Image (tube, rainbow, N blue to C red):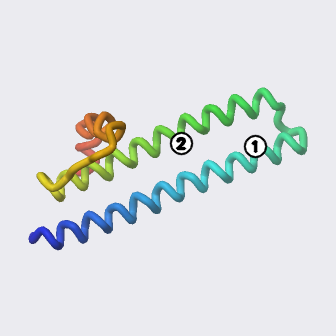
Amino acid sequence: MDIERKFELSDFLEQKYKQFHKNIMGVKSQTNQQLKAGMEREYIDGPDASIANKEIEEIIVHYVKLGKLIFWARQKDLLRHQFKLTNEDDIILARQIGSVKHIVL
């Protein structure tokens, strides 16, 4: 496969990751709205809603991180030496790509 085709596939993967991220954020927003509605209707107490919100936030962060790692693993597999990260936090996170390599292959 030529390099131009690889970059096209890489762009396609990036679009898929952005859609995944958008969907995850939509779930987060909808869940927060449901918690707020539950509190307004007094189905859920404030402290319970706070605990649930923190747990949901942890779950969202986990899946965003996992999605990012899978996306990077696929890009790295596709682009090989052309795969570069510039953000220092991303470089640190990318060290965990090996933990999701089995999903990509």
Taking the spot 39% from the left edge, 43% from the top edge, the residue there is 66
Q: Is residue 87 visible?
A: yes
Q: Is residue 105 visible?
A: no
Drawn side of residue 65 relative to residue 30, left or right: left
> Residue lying farthest right?
41
> Residue lying farthest left?
2
Residue flagged by tag 2: what amino acid is it?
Ile
Mark 1: few/some/many CA within 10 Å (<14, 14-19, 20+): many
Taking the spot 57% from the left edge, 52% from the top edge, the residue there is 25
Q: Which residue is mark 2?
A: 60
Cα gap from disc 2 to disc 1, whole angstroms: 15 Å
Q: Which residue is mark 1?
A: 35
Q: Which of 90/39 is in front?
A: 90
Mark positioned earlier in the residue sequence (2 or 1):
1
Q: Is residue 45 above or below residue 35?
A: above
Helix, strand or loop status at disc 1? helix
Residue flagged by tag 1: what amino acid is it?
Leu
Taking the spot 9% from the left edge, 71% from the top edge, the residue there is 2
Q: Is residue 40 above or below residue 75?
A: above
Location of residue 104 in the rendering, given as x and y in whole percent from the top left corner: 25, 51
Q: Which of 41/61 is in front?
A: 61
Taking the spot 44% from the left edge, 60% from the top edge, the residue there is 18
Location of residue 39 in the rendering, given as x and y in whole percent from the top left corner: 84, 40
Q: Quadrant of the N terminus?
A: bottom left
